Image (cartoon, rainbow, N blue to C red):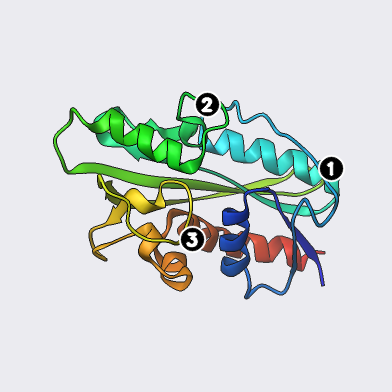
Amino acid sequence: MPQLLIATNNRGKQEELHSLLRDLKVALVTPADLGLTLEVAEDGTTYQENAAKKARAFAQASGLIVLADDSGLEVDALDNAPGLYSARYAPQPNATDADRRTYLLTQLQSYNRPWKARFRCVVAIGTPAGALEFAEGICPGEIIPEERGDHGFGYDPIFLLPSQGKTMAELSMDQKNQLSHRALAVQAAKPKLEILLARL
């Protein structure tokens, strides 16, 4: 069975991607499974650039087909911030997900609700030969001032999906994997991934 490297050390992302890709005839591995320690500077100017950098670097280092992603939260009132900097948004060093959520809410206090927002994800599939394929997913919603839900990670507890009446953190994994930005991007990427894997 061919191997597919999931190019992230984020445990939350790994769980989501394992669930999203479980129907593929492929052995999913993580950098830790391979003993691979690789830090890729996410200094691109778009999600696609950052995802491509990660996919290319991990494919070259591992010799495997790689799936990488870059994603962010875009809030209309903040001119689409935090965007590319969602994981590094809070000013304090070593900030936690909770710190980032708190900082985002302080930035929104002077704006009227609803705080319209969207999660955006770009998935990059990279091969050891340097080929790249991309897919994108967008999940619209709004930011709410109180945290709800115990699932997910990042900004999920304050990201409300009005169509569901729930935050991303209140959804089950199965529900999230039908609606989330990452789920939509991976679903769009699967046909391209299956073609590449079939060639192995």
Q: In the structure shown, which secondary structural element does the residue marked by tag 3 occupy?
A: helix
Label 3–label 2 contact, CB within 8 A: no
Residue beneath the point at 23% across and 64% down: 165
Residue 111 pos. (x, y %): 17, 31
What amino acid is found at the position of numbered circle 2 in the picture? Thr
Q: Nearer the viewer, residue 143 or 121?
A: 143
Quadrant location of residue 168?
A: bottom left
Q: In the structure shown, which secondary structural element does the residue marked by tag 2 occupy?
A: loop
In the rendering, which numbered label is found on residue 16?
none
Residue bearing mark 3:
183
Q: How far apart are the alpha carbons under marks 3 and 1?
A: 26 Å
Q: How far apart are the alpha carbons under marks 2 and 1?
A: 23 Å
Q: Residues within 10 Å of mark 3 (few under 14, many from 20)?
A: many
Residue bearing mark 1:
61
Quadrant location of residue 73?
A: top left
Residue bearing mark 2:
45
Q: Point out the tag, 3 or 1, that comes first from the N-terminus.
A: 1
Residue beneath the point at 66% across and 72% down: 24
Q: Nearer the viewer, residue 60 or 109?
A: 109
Is 98 left or right of 78, judged from the image as shown?
right
Q: Residues within 10 Å of mark 2 (few under 14, many from 20)?
A: few
Q: How far apart are the alpha carbons under marks 3 and 2?
A: 23 Å
Residue beneath the point at 43% across and 70% down: 172
Q: Residues within 10 Å of mark 1 (few under 14, many from 20)?
A: few
